[in-house]
Structures are given as C-alpha cells and as structure tokens.
C-alpha cells in the first residue's frame, strides 16, 4: 500500500498571480478552509484555480470563498464534490469582525492570494485590498520593467 506524501510547510499549491497587479494589498490574513477529502486531493494534485475567486460575508457574519475552482478528483467517483461550491473560511471571531467592519465601511474587498500548506493543513492566504487605478497599474508595469533592465545590465556586466 502506498503512503500519501507529506505536505511541506509553506508550499503554495495555487496562486492568484493577477491579484497583486489588480489590487493594492493593505492587510494579509490566513484562514483555514472547510474542504472535502476529494478537494484536498485535487488541490495537492494542482487541480485548483483562484483566478475568479473572491471572499464574501453572508448574513450571519460567516466568511465564504466564492468562485474558487477545485477540479473533481477522478478516483472519488460518487463521493466527488462540485467544482465551484461555496467553501467556508475558518478564522477567529475577532479577525472576522475586523474584516467585516473594514469591508463594510471602507469599500475594500477580500481577495484570496494563494492556497498553501501549514502544519499539514491547507490554508488560504487572503488580503484586504483596494482596487488600483489605471495609472497605478502603469506605474507598477514601469517599475517592473526598470527592475528587469537593471538585472539585465548587472548580468551583462559580469
């Protein structure tokens, strides 16, 4: 019988790369995710995407992950999950209250950044963000290009 490989701490299974370009990150938080067994196996196999995902509070103050696609696990058969189902995020009550207040008052949004391993569990890194304006995006592109030029010049100089 084969053993399931251990998950290394800090290993990112899925990243939302576009989030850092589209949004200005104000605060970062970490939350647990209520997952089914077939979802955990799919995430470990890299069959997940956070491209369209966002986090939102429901009427009773619970935080849920919306539009996160976790592909079906082929070996689960009848016990498989729905790929786009809502997933409850697990955080301390004080953290949830702080985030709910920030989202309600300031017009900020909660964006998932990545799914990673911590102590053998799959966690979600989420950020309290404000949308960037077009000129902020242009500044980010310009800054990134300048860093690339500097790195090229250093490599050519050696």
Image (cartoon, helix red, strand yellow):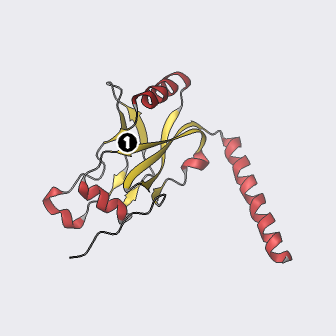
Residue 149 in which image quadrant: bottom right
Mark 1 surroundings: few (<14), some (14-19) or many (≥20) residues within 10 A: many
Residue in the picture at 55% in, 52% down: 18
Vertical order, 75 against 66 (above or below): below
Image quadrant holding the N terminus, namely: bottom left
User: Which residue is at the far left?
Assistant: 78
Is 102 positioned to the left or the right of 4 in the image?
Answer: right
Mark 1, secondary structure of its residue: strand
The residue lying toward the viewer, choosing from 128 and 142, is 128
Vertical order, 127 against 70 (above or below): above
Vertical order, 22 against 73 (above or below): above
User: Which residue is at the far right?
Assistant: 157
User: Which residue is at the far top?
Assistant: 105
Instruction: Give the total of numbered labels.
Output: 1
- Which residue in the protein does label 1 denote? 65
Image quadrant holding the C terminus, namely: bottom right
Question: Residue 97 at what x, y percent from top left?
Answer: 44, 25
Residue in the picture at 82% in, 76% down: 156
Residue 48 in which image quadrant: bottom left
Is 143 positioned to the left or the right of 114 in the image?
Answer: right
Residue in the picture at 86% in, 76% down: 157
Question: Residue 53 at what x, y percent from top left?
Answer: 42, 46
């Amino acid at each position: 019988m084969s053993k399931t490989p251990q998950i290394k701490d800090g290993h990112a299974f899925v990243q939302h790369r576009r989030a850092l370009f589209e949004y200005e990150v104000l605060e970062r938080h970490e939350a647990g995710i209520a997952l089914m067994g077939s979802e955990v196996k799919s995430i470990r196999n890299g069959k997940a995407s956070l491209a369209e995902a966002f986090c939102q509070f429901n009427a009773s103050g619970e935080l849920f992950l919306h539009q996160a696609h976790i592909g079906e696990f082929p070996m689960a058969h009848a016990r498989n999950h729905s790929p786009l189902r809502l997933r409850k995020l697990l955080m301390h009550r004080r953290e949830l209250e702080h985030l709910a207040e920030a989202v309600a008052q300031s017009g900020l949004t909660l964006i998932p950044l990545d799914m990673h391993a911590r102590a053998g569990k799959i966690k979600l890194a989420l950020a309290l963000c404000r949308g960037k304006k077009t000129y902020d995006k242009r500044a980010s592109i310009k800054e990134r290009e300048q860093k690339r030029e500097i790195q090229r010049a250093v490599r050519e100089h050696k």
